[in-house]
Image: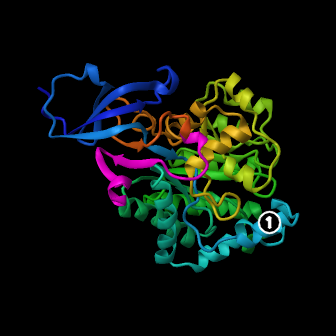
Amino acid sequence: MRGDWDTLWVNCHAATMTAGGGAYGAIDDAAIATRGGRIAWIGARRDLPECAPARTVDLGGHWITPGLVDCHTHLVYGGNRAREFEMRLEGASYEDVARAGGGIVATVRATRAAGEAELLESALKRLDALRAEGVTVVEIKSGYGLDLETERRMLKVARTLAERRPVTVRATCLAAHALPPEYHGRSDAYIDLVWRTMLPALAADGLVDAVDAFCERIAFSAGQVERVFEAARGLALPVKLHTEQLSDQGGTQLAARFGALSVDHLEYVSEAGVRALAGTGTVAVLLPGAFYTLGETHVPPVESLRAHGVPIALASDANPGTSPACSLRLMLNMACRFFGLTPEEALAGVTREGARALGLEKHYGTLETGKIGDFAVWDIEHPAELAYWLGGNPCVRVVRSGAIVLDAVRHLQ
């Protein structure tokens, strides 16, 4: 008798998203057992061993997937940039806006002026929108402070979000995001501040899980980013990189050399950059929300990434300027429509590969025995619907570590 199971979940179909497990790793008429916050058993209900769980939950014939993973967000910031949206519609490019004092620097001003409570309140709203669509793991970057005090405040808020909501948060230091106005014309001096002072201080505070940078002609060169990455290596912190979004700067090759968890954007990555990723385990994170918002036309080389076996993840890139998106599920549709991903690839991108992009694949991203008991319950007839529907929210339950943390059905009764 397996009476040590906390909960047995029955009457469902499971898209386990395990690699090599057939389409979606699907199990019809599945059952899943959780114990101590982890998956203790999963399989077809007909194969269920004799058991006496503490409780049994009927999932109403719905589909379950792993809890979704949003592996690239900027949820903590002050203000918004709706006016810049108007400017771009009037013909201004992203670079035009940045050079006119808008862009990232505009958010820096608003974020520096915002207190911790204000940043927390606004970030909670955005996080709750993601959670309502099945997100149980989220990465949150700093990068709108560009000074030690504000970067620390942003990262503290990211940690507090994980205390206020039942969600796993990975905090990434993105101090090398843009050049702050007080360092105009002195980018090398600012990069020295980042790697010599900011990273060690923030890591000592226990606020950093990974280090990111923006390698782009309006941000920092590959050589400057390399200094930041060397400092991260010295602090035993993994690295990630925003790169090849607007031009090919060779950032992908740099990231591959440092064994980066991920390289993100990649609209302009070269074939040499893709080849550099092959076999490294570094994940290509595609961000269709930014592609859409900026009106970009240069599509990431998905066929080349596939051919070289590079894992592909998706994320919301939720941020105030270039991807004001609070729906990870919408990114599935955009990735299929704009980038040519299949619905299965898109769902893998926000589950299995999203977890890999955060270095969390041993615990999250698939429904397998031993992994954390995170899953979302969907009122759909087939997993492809998660990429098909525009609008609406078919997520009816979210389970985190074996406990129900969202129950839309009960809420609506």
Residue 90 inside the magenta-drawn segment: no
The reply to whether residue 107 is in sight is yes
Q: Is residue 80 above or below residue 176?
A: below
Region of the chain picked out in magenta, as a range = 386-413
Instruction: Where is residue 262? Give x, y as percent.
Output: 60, 40
The x and y percentages for residue 315 are 59, 47
Residue occupying image coordinates x 52% and y 58%: 200
The answer to whether residue 266 is left or right of residue 367 is right
Which residue is tagged 1? 98
- Camera-nearest residue between 307 and 269: 307
Q: Is residue 382 left or right of residue 5?
A: right
Q: Residue at x 69, y 59 (%)?
A: 191
Quarter of the figure that contains the C terminus? bottom left
Q: Amino acid at mark 1?
A: Ala
Question: Please, is residue 326 above or below residue 234 in the view?
Answer: below
Percent across and percent down for residue 398 are: 38, 48
Judged from the image, the secondary structure of the residue bearing numbered disc 1 is: helix
- 10 Å neighbourhood of mark 1: few (<14), some, or many (≥20)? some
Residue at image position (58%, 50%) is: 72
Question: Compared with residue 331, is residue 258 higher up or lower down, i.e. above or below?
Answer: above
Residue sitting at the far front: 413
Name the residue nearer the viewer: 228 or 385: 385
Which quadrant of the rendered structure holds the N terminus?
top left
